[in-house]
Amino acid sequence: MKRNKKKLVINGLFIVAFVFLFFWVLFRYGDELTYLLKDPAKFEKWILGFGTKGILIFIAVQILQVLIFVIPGEVVQIAGGYLYGTFLGSLYSLIGITIGSLLCFTIARVLGYEFVRGMLSDEKLKKFDYLINNKKGELGLFLVFLLPGLPKDALSYVAGLTPVKFLNFFLITAAARLPGIVISSYIGANIEHKNYIVSAVISVIAVILFVIGIINKDKIMKKMNHFDE
């Protein structure tokens, strides 16, 4: 009984600390980062202003984006391609996104269901029942991360509630997110090289796929709920 009470107190303190950090970062840096990311040239100037530490700052921005999910990940990935080119932009984005995802996963695993429920509505959590209550949820998790238009913002937190092992989650999130990261970085690299036609064509294709995913989101997730039957 005492051990459970102590655990509840510790979890409560973690939750309060995380919520405080979440909103502090949101109000302190959210508007500034959003403003900078709207203009790749300004973001590039800001990053390069840190000198050799610029790469670490960019990776930190990616980690932050995953943790507080207020800035669209694709925007940061495009900025990475603009800054570092397709290959290095993809690599740095993948490192940041993977670290951020693993932190979300670990936080949710430590603090549990009530913490995640405080961030998401019960309705949204019910959509992920097939992951939370399914020992074979790896396939569903992979597909949600891979397919455009499906909800990814807080999925890394939800994943921490599932039976999926830490190493498996690491492999799933890295592999499933890589194609989208490369495409976004490629768009950014072409913008930097003023290949606007190429960027526009790829962006249109990406938007079409995203819209298709949004339109069919509920159908896809409903099928995932029964994929193991």
Image (spheres, rainbow, N blue to C red):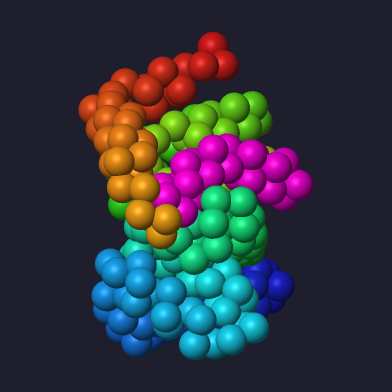
Q: Is residue 110 something one can see in this rendering?
A: yes
Which residue occupies the extreme right position in the image? 167
The residue sitting at 62% across, 57% down in the picture is 88
Q: How far across and how far down the image is residue 52, in percent? A: 64, 83
Compared across the picture, whether 20 is left or right of 213 comes to right
Q: How far across and how far down the image is residue 177, in percent? A: 55, 43
Q: Quadrant of residue 94?
A: bottom right
Q: Is residue 114 something one can see in this rendering?
A: no
Q: Is residue 172 magenta?
A: yes
Q: Quadrant of residue 198?
A: top left
Q: How far across and how far down the image is residue 12, in percent? A: 52, 76
Would you say the magenta stretch is mainly helix, strand or loop? helix
Work out which quarter of the rendered image holds the C terminus and state it.
top right
Q: Which residues are magenta?
A: 165-190
The residue sitting at 70% across, 42% down in the picture is 171
Which residue occupies the extreme top position in the image? 229
Q: Is residue 73 magenta?
A: no
Closest to the observer, 199 or 149? 199
Numbered-mark total: 0
The correct choice, above or below, for 162 with respect to 157 in the image is above
